[in-house]
Amino acid sequence: MAESKHSHGRRGRSPGLRAWCVLGAGLAIAGLAGCGSSGSSPAASQSGPVTLKFWNQYNEVDGEQKAMVDVVIPAFEKANPGIKVQSIYYNDNVIEQKFLAAAAAGDPPDIMRADIADVPALANQGTLTDLGTAMSDYKAITADALPGPLATNEWKGQYYGLPLDTNTQALYWNKALFAAAGLSGPPTTLSQLFSDAAKLTNKSKGIYGLGVDGTDIWNVAPYIWSSDGSFTNADFTTASGYMDSPATEAAVQTLVNLRKTGDIGTDFLGGTGAVSGEEGFPKSQYAMYIDGPWAVPTFTADKNVPSYGIALFPSGSGGSVSTVGGEDVIIPAGTKHLADAEKFAAFLDQPLSQLEMAQQGDMSVMTTDAAGEVKNDSYDAIFTTQLETARDRAVVPNYALLDTDFSDVLQKILAGKVSVDAGLAQAASQANKALSSS
């Protein structure tokens, strides 16, 4: 799936329901629910060096983890003698569950990189430090932050993390396949995108015109939002009349039709043997698909990738709207190393860290770093422009449940088990329950 590096916020697989409800009781028993930083003991009062355990999902295949371990962390340690940082990798599909289990056992990491979609749920469980209150320089650090990424840290008026990196998806297109189909360039409208997908499909050669990397909201939202459809109201309190609106139904029906005619690849329905866009695009199995900036360093390292371009997501009646992704940095409630963890969290938002990780596809959350990003990596200009109209998904604790329910219903629609209108009505009803219990 297109978000395979990090669930929700970046290339994630449809996440499924996290174990939040199950672990909630354990957290309460452990005495963590509702606790804050008031019980923390700053490391300055302890003797000897401190080692911070930094849990993250920085990819180990491309340059992400290497840049963090070889560049960012050593720079921090040099500037902060006596503080060491141990980078501990977990797969994006398990890191939140591991965190909750560790928090319930009273042994969470000192600091963690969390997907933006998961912060409200973790905050609602009482597992996070209210950094907006605990960090005296929180407002100064975030004064230059982009509003969208900053907002993902807020829950019930408090800020439980610092924005760390952001991203969105744009359209990748294969220049050779376009030329072979007699197409001069990428589509600029949704209707053109869909018609081009049919022209680009060559079943005898195993070429699909379009790849849609899953039925989850991250991958489907650009098609729905750009068609003037939606999932919930602006306040994230109801899905009825939005997830099942005529515009949403029409957008989903178009995708279903393209899947039936074979113009959307196996990545959409998924399952055994399915080929993701990131796997198939470099092999010319997909003529178009949407992905984030992290794909560029990966493709650059692969000398066999065909010539390609990146364009803004095509516009529909709702404009050109993609999905905001990214991660935040959080500190567990009751941490023993609050002061030192705060220093590292703040360092991750400084230009050295932001621009170094931007070269790995982790776009900066700071407005003043945008020019440096584009200077270092010209392709970031497309994603920076796309972010101007990109939208956040529902910022609610039960987003994972809402997303899973929608994805499951769309799977049933694609399998022909339920009609589009009946399926989306069912999905909206299920989403209402998720929203009301958030």
Image: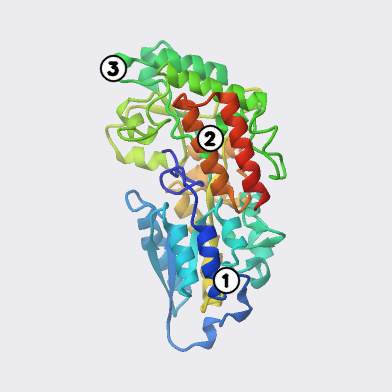
- Taking the image as shown, residue 383 lies to the left or right of residue 147, namely left
Please tell me how crowded label 2 is: few (under 14), some (14-19), or many (20+) other residues with Cα within 10 Å.
Answer: some
Q: Nearer the viewer, residue 297 or 341?
A: 341
- The residue depicted at 39 percent of the width and 25 percent of the height is 265
Viewer-side label of 3, 2: 3
- Taking the image as shown, residue 62 lies to the left or right of residue 342, namely left
- The residue depicted at 54 percent of the width and 59 percent of the height is 21
Considering the numbered disc 3 on the image, is that residue within a helix, a strand or a loop?
helix
Q: Height in image: 44 above or below 242?
A: below
Which residue position holds label 2? 382
The scheme the figure's colours follow is: rainbow
Which residue position holds label 3? 205
**Closer to the N terminus: mark 3 or mark 1?**
1
Kind of residue at disc 3: Lys
Residue 52: x and y in percent read 44, 73
Instruction: Using the image, tell me which numbered label, if any, was put on residue 332.
Output: none
CA distance separating discs 1 and 2: 45 Å
Which residue position holds label 1? 28
- Taking the image as shown, residue 160 lies to the left or right of residue 351, namely right
Q: Nearer the viewer, residue 71 or 206?
A: 206
**Closer to the N terminus: mark 3 or mark 2?**
3
**Closer to the N terminus: mark 1 or mark 2?**
1
Residue furthest top in the image:
182
Residue 36: x and y in percent read 62, 73
Residue 175: x and y in percent read 39, 22
Report the quarter where the N terminus lies.
Answer: top left
Q: Nearer the viewer, residue 199 or 17?
A: 17
Viewer-side label of 1, 2: 1
